[in-house]
């Protein structure tokens, strides 16, 4: 289905029926939002402008209103309550994102020798994973996405997302035609006490299934870090019934997350141990801090002036979303530069479910700020 607007989400939602992505997936909802992005319009006039029956327009508006994606003015008009930019409005941000992404990609390139030396000290090669198998996780997911966002929050440059009507805490924004990058990606994660998993997503990469790791799946993963175990041994460690473990491990193995070797199970994805966190994540935070301090922070005034120039003052409470939007635009263009400069290979059109997937023991420090939301 053709999209008018590329929407992006940052944070966590609690009500799947009010998910901003679900509420805005139809072309009708997108056309409505584009028409009311800057000024209030009556439902009748919206329908006239976009060529839709007013009843259909009102139905879409009522759902968008439930999660405060639109609001009603005292003149009985409707106006978007999130940041939406059309193709012309986004151009200044795209130009800035491209400029800053070049600087960021060069800094990451300069850090490669030290990063690779640090990688050699970790447990990944012992688990059977080379740098080439993990470069997207380290450079794209952990530095360009999670690392930079962690540093931005920690240094007070981006406020954490506010609470929303659905009970979640998130930022949500839209760009007509996207960020003008050739590639787009993000990271989805899930964690429990003791560990978690995350994976890179991109609409450019086709995988066999989008089934995420559930809490119980993570619990089964934890004892398998750096060792292979029989189903009975996993059941003993996790205190799950043998039948439950057999069923879950069969499903996860069929999906490709685990390999069965001589009656034991072994993960088909890297798992960060506590020592790996201490060694590699510390280095990633250092690099992310340097990107924020030397490339992004000096442009804070420029970011503010662009916000004012775009006449977004009515959405001052969404300034954090505006900043997130800009940094995510930079992030996508950084990936373009890393691929174009042969630092990363092209993303595969088709990939196994474990591409860009990893787990960890303990807490992933890069997610601790967002987890607090």
Image: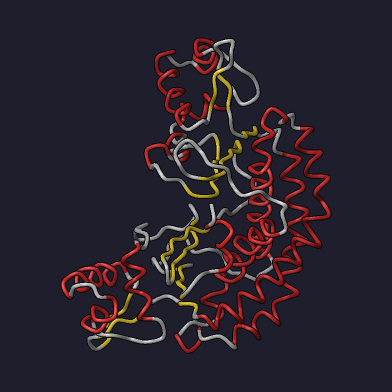
97 and 324: which one is in front?
Answer: 324
**Residue that lies at the very extreme toward the left in this rendered image:** 243
Expressed as whole percent of the image width and height from the top left, the position of residue 262 reads 24, 89
**Residue name at image x 35 percent, y 80 percent:** 223
**Residue name at image x 42 percent, y 13 percent:** 53
Residue 342 lies in quadrant: bottom right
**Residue name at image x 65 percent, y 36 percent:** 317
Expressed as whole percent of the image width and height from the top left, the position of residue 42 reads 54, 12
- Image-based side of 97 in relation to 348, left or right: right
Q: In the picture shown, does residue 235 fall above or below 169?
A: below
Quadrant of the image for the N terminus? top left
**Residue name at image x 45 percent, y 85 percent:** 128
Q: How has the structure been colored for display? A: secondary structure
Q: In the picture shown, does residue 140 fall above or below 23?
A: below
132 and 157: which one is in front?
Answer: 157
- Image-based side of 343 in relation to 66, left or right: right
Q: In the picture shown, does residue 295 fall above or below 253?
A: above
Expressed as whole percent of the image width and height from the top left, the position of residue 333 reads 67, 55
Expressed as whole percent of the image width and height from the top left, the position of residue 166 reads 44, 38
Looking at the rendered structure, the number of numbered marks drawn on it comes to: 0
Residue 106 lies in quadrant: bottom right
- Image-based side of 80 in relation to 301, left or right: left
148 and 138: which one is in front?
Answer: 148
């Amino acid at each position: 289905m053709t999209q008018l607007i590329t929407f992006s989400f940052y944070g966590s939602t609690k009500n799947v029926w009010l998910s901003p992505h679900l509420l805005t997936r139809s072309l009708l909802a997108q056309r409505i939002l584009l028409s009311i992005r800057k000024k209030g319009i009556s439902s009748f006039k919206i329908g006239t402008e976009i060529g839709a029956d007013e009843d259909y327009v009102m139905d879409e508006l009522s759902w968008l209103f439930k999660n405060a994606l639109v609001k009603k003015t005292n003149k009985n008009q409707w106006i978007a309550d999130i940041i939406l930019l059309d193709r012309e409005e986004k151009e200044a941000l795209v130009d800035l994102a491209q400029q800053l992404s070049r600087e960021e990609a060069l800094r990451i390139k300069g850090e490669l020798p030290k990063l690779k030396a640090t990688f050699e000290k970790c447990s990944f090669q012992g688990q059977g994973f080379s740098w080439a198998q993990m470069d997207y996780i380290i450079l794209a997911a952990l530095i360009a996405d999670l690392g930079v966002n962690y540093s931005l929050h920690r240094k007070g440059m981006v406020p954490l997302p506010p609470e929303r009507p659905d009970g979640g805490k998130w930022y949500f924004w839209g760009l007509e035609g996207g960020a003008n990058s050739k590639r787009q990606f993000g990271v989805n994660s899930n964690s429990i006490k003791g560990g978690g998993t995350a994976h890179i997503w991109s609409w450019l990469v086709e995988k066999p299934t989008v089934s995420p790791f559930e809490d119980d799946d993570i619990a089964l993963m934890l004892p398998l870090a750096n060792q292979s175990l029989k189903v009975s041994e996993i059941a003993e460690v996790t205190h799950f019934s043998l039948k439950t473990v057999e069923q879950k491990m069969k499903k996860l193995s069929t999906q490709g997350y685990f390999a069965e070797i001589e009656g034991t199970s072994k993960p088909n994805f890297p798992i960060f141990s506590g020592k790996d966190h201490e060694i590699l994540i510390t280095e990633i935070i250092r690099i992310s801090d340097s990107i924020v301090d030397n490339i992004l922070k000096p442009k804070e005034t420029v970011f503010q002036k662009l916000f004012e120039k775009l006449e977004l003052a009515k959405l001052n409470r969404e300034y954090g979303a505006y900043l997130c939007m800009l940094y995510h635009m930079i992030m996508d263009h950084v990936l373009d530069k890393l691929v174009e400069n042969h630092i990363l290979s092209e993303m595969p059109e088709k990939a196994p479910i474990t591409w860009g997937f990893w787990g960890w023991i303990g807490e992933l420090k890069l997610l601790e700020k967002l987890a607090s939301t």
